[in-house]
Amino acid sequence: MAGVRERKRRMVAKLVDVHLNNYKNSGAELVMGSGRFIGPKTIEVTSVGSAIRVLRGRRVVINTGTRATIEATPGLREANPLTHIEALELDHVPEHLIVLGGGFVGLELAQAMRRFGSRVTVVDRNNRLIHREDEDISEAVHELCKDEGIDVVTNTRITRVEGRSGESVKLSADRDASAIVLEASHILAAAGRTPNTDGIGLELAGVETTSNGYIKVNERLETTAPDVWAAGECAGSPHFTHISENDFHIIAENIQGGRRVTTGRQVPFCLFTDPEFARIGLSEREAKERGISYRLAKIPFGVVFRAQTLSETRGFMKALIDTRSERILGFSAFGAEVGEVMASVQVAMIAGLPYTALRDAIFAHPTMAEGLIPLFSNVSLVPAVTR
């Protein structure tokens, strides 16, 4: 684990160096410190050594991100649970790790720690893992956890935590109206995110927040204060690095008089377990909730020749097809390298192509993308029934 940690540190250091060089080469001034608004477009920065500077700008962009939520469960904060930050700094393998949360962060780290040798238990308050996704996706991920030896406890709400993470912890919980007790050596808090907007003087800058603490922005990412923008997770944008980067491009152009908006943009994302889950566009659940009629294409991953050659046949791919235009409404896949396959579908969606363009394409053999041919050759004739 010390070697794993060192590799991670080297990767992070390289990325930090890239960004520092970008600042240097751009001529921009970088001030490292803790900042807070003391008035409209005016920020007080306290740097290392308690040096204080006051900065005022014609325009201000807020990009403070989010942090792992530590819920107000009695004893949880006192137990000093790991978040993804501390989990990536471990120099040892936890004997038994309890992961609070069956979302993306929790599942990725659960599988990693299990493969390193930990006993792992995932606890989620919902009735299934990644509960916002379609049921077949949740079932596939649950089955993966089972096969990896990860215990999954759903419909469970933690009521009390005793002990200290890294030593010994005991969790009291309610599961389906029954009391249960879970014991482990470590806890990982991965049940949601909290925006880093408290205590930075937003009210003094005229910047309003939502009831959940996210900064209120319009489709141009403008806040309620003139010439003040917000980007990334603190602005309530989908919690993905590539979306935060897209926010930056939108703001950069709008500052120069552009008219770019977030409305209608595509949000591709991946769950980087092994195998991966990837999605772009509508899921079946979302289509049904919105009353959108669609035709479904679905194939098991085992029919993809490349998956056979790699002996990586777990999973499936599916797509939703608009019943009128025959354009692709959404693509979901659980399988090896599906994040790369998704990119081909996304380009077709951007271009507004009918699904037949991918069905009739010639992809190199054997590649994962070749699996799009049998997928789009298997579109149902009967539309799915929606509300």
Image (spheres, helix red, strand yellow):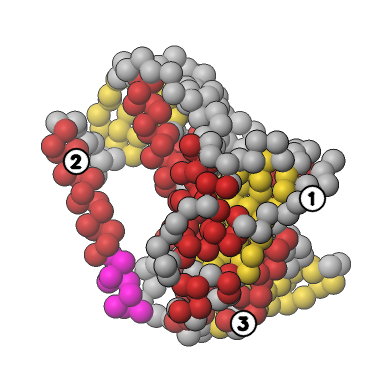
Residue 202 vertical placement versus 281 (above, below) = above
Label 1 and label 3: CA atoms lie apart by 35 Å
- Residue range of the region highlighted in magenta in the rendering: 1-9
Residue 6 in magenta stretch:
yes
- Residue situated in front as seen by the camera: 348 or 377: 377
**Residue 255: where, in percent of width, then height?**
35, 19
Label 2 and label 3: CA atoms lie apart by 45 Å
Image position of 109 (left or right of 286)? left
Q: Which mark is residue 382?
A: 1
Residue to which mark 2 is pinned: 22
- Please identify, in this view, whether the residue under mark 1 or under mark 3 is nearer the observer: 1
Q: Earlier in the sequence, mark 2 or mark 1?
A: 2
Residue to which mark 3 is pinned: 147
Residue shown at 37%/68% (left/top)?
A: 89
Element at label 1: loop
Specify the amino acid type for callout 2: Asn
Specify the amino acid type for callout 3: Asp
Q: Earlier in the sequence, mark 1 or mark 3?
A: 3
- Residue situated in front as seen by the camera: 122 or 86: 122
